Amino acid sequence: MSIDESSTGGPGSVLLPAVAPEVLAEAVESLSGRLRKKLDAAIEGCAAGAVRAADGSVGVRFGEDAVVTLRPGPSGVVTEADQAVCGCLLAPRCLHRAAVLGASPIADPEEPAPPAPGPDPVPGPAATAGPGAAPGAPAASEATTWTRAAAGPPAGPGAAADAGPGTGASAASAATTWTRAATGPAAGPGAAAAAEPGRGAEGAAGGGGLTAAQVRAAAALWGAAAEALAAGVTAGGAVVQAELLRAAHTARIAGLPRAEAAALRVVRGLRAARDRSAAQRLAELTGAFRELLYTAGLLASGTPGPGLTGAVRRSYEAGGSLRVYGLCREPVLSATGYGGVATHLLGVDGAHYSVSDVRPGGLSRARGAGAASVALGGAVLDHAGLARGGLRVVGATVSPEGRLGAGRGVRATAVGGVAWGEGPTAALFSRPAAEAVAAMPAEGAEPGLLGCDVRVVGASGDHVLVRELTPGATLLRLAPAHPHPELPHAANLRRIAGHPGLVLRVLGRPDLDRAATLRPLAVGPVPGAEHSLRLPPEWLGRADLGYDRLQGAHFPGDAEGLVPQESAPAAGADPLADSPLWRVRRLLEAGVAGGRRAVAEAARGAEPAALAAALRRAGFGSAAELAAVLTAEADRRPRDAFGRLTDASAEPYAWAWLAAAAHLAAAERSLVAASWT
């Protein structure tokens, strides 16, 4: 287990050890109803008084008679209930103990021990989510997985609602499928199962790939997630979080690590939002809720889809003998204090590989790891040399993501590298960027690398506007692969933006959440071009933007005829930013921030009519319908003659919210895909 430092609640809370989710959930569950109402107030500020003793235990004093003592195990995590004790008379069912546990960081059961040299090192999840990923953010490709899975089978005749300009069939299908789930009679986790004969919980347990225990655990997690969504950040205190943690632990025991990980991301996001952490983004918490509801909802219906259950740890398989060539280096910096480097490689058959060196150390580790030695099969080579050289590997072990393991039987020998555009690297730059993006698989850990030759147009904020050298190519935006100011990504792009008309070769990763945006990892001169980069020979025709710093001598002078081919204002419209879908996104985020009540308030007044009119004018009829269903469901609180709620379930509201979120993700992804063409 590891500590998620981003979820700590203040300067003193760094002293508190991480707590296993099930320990916190059990402590909250043992409280009486009266004490639960006081829990959120008790958590605030209690960590500031934490004191670490010489034996490694941490104590927090409450008044004169109560001291809570945490004694973490060898891993530094409180994993057992008896490792948290209180000296008051009500212990262990006391408010003091639950408050200290609630103020402690949440340990992540999925994350292995900190990586160290040895067989098949694996970094923490935040590091593997992609260098530049925000704390707690999902991987870049999760939107793709969501779109394809949410689309599901056709919902029947007349179900293909108009999803608006640029949206594909998957968007319309997603909207219709989830609309039926939200508005139909079976609006709960079992709705999808009931819609298909023989696919109920028992049927799934028998031949569908999921056991009855997994379906029950997923249904419990779905219910807890629905209640947390209805509460929102404002009411999503320690009690709501504890219910999610208990359901997440049950999901882990049942063998559903993906659902558990999604629940933990939601809990950490709720904590950070309630603490007003600067690292928290409402859009990220909205995405975490969407992932949790989507995963738990499908699992609860007995639908086992590919990768829906998840895996606790990567498995490395024998790769035989490989010959790989370096492409570039990429700094890795995670929110949990890990830092390092990932060097991207290309095999002679065009397969992509990587060698990672990620350990605790944060920014300083990420900056220094670019020149660290490569811990792979005894190869006498550092990452800077590997990025411009190559390796011959015997007895290779490879993860499904293409990471090369450092097992005992691996032997590696350094070989000469190849310039970009030669040998197997020629395929990276042989087709337009739009064609390469369209050919990328819809599902995966993250989008692959692509290369293109571009001409600089100018700067647009922190982006660089470029146009491919192919006839009729669209305008692209180059954005920093990692925004941290201590890494040279942004500074290098600013230098490039200052030379309109410059032609250069770019290798990067497309940002599938933004219109026609490429996040470059390395750049180089275009062979045969007169006005291109002039890099030192030892750089082998490439500059790693996360480590190498471009200087004035690397650019051609103005006197050499370097002139822009077009002006920067010719950037054109951003189809994603200019679409009225932002109104739906704002409605969904309002529901996450203020809960069901905030969405119900948005249904009153002129706002719903303006939202629907703007969406329908732009052709997003399905989005308008789903937004109307969401606001209507949020405001539906039937009561009897005595004012008591007759239907207090939050599940129909959660289905309506998920329907709108699924359609929004599909529509935005379709607009992004269209922006590349």
Image: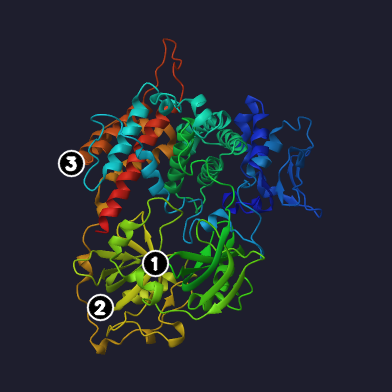
Q: Which residue is mark 1?
A: 508
Local crowd at mark 3 within 10 Å, few (<14), some, or many (≥20)? few
Residue 636: % across, % down: 37, 23
At label 2, which amino acid type do we have? Answer: Gly
Give the image quarter of residue 604: top left
Mark 2 and mark 1: span between their CA atoms?
A: 20 Å
Q: Is residue 612 visible?
A: yes
Numbered badge on residue 614: none
Left or right: 434 as drawn, with respect to 337: left
Q: Which residue is mark 2?
A: 501
Residue 489: % across, % down: 43, 70
Q: Is residue 227 visible?
A: no
Give the image quarter of residue 583: top left
- The residue shown at (46%, 77%) is 548
Tag 1 or tag 2, which sits nearer the N-term?
2
Q: Of 259 and 615, which appears nearest the observer? A: 259
At label 1, which amino acid type do we have? Answer: Gly
Tag 3 or tag 1, which sits nearer the N-term?
1
Residue 612's place in the image compared with 277, above or below, is: above
At label 3, which amino acid type do we have? Answer: Arg
Q: Decide: marks 2, 3 in contact (CB < 8 A)?
A: no
Tag 3 or tag 2, which sits nearer the N-term?
2
Residue 315's place in the image compared with 562, above or below, is: above
Residue 433: % across, % down: 30, 64
Mark nearer the viewer, 2 or 1: 1
At numbered mark 3, what does the secondary structure look like: helix, strand or loop? helix
Mark 2 and mark 3: span between their CA atoms?
A: 39 Å
Mark nearer the viewer, 2 or 3: 2
Q: Which residue is mark 3?
A: 617
Residue reaching furthest to the bottom: 559
Local crowd at mark 2 within 10 Å, few (<14), some, or many (≥20)? many
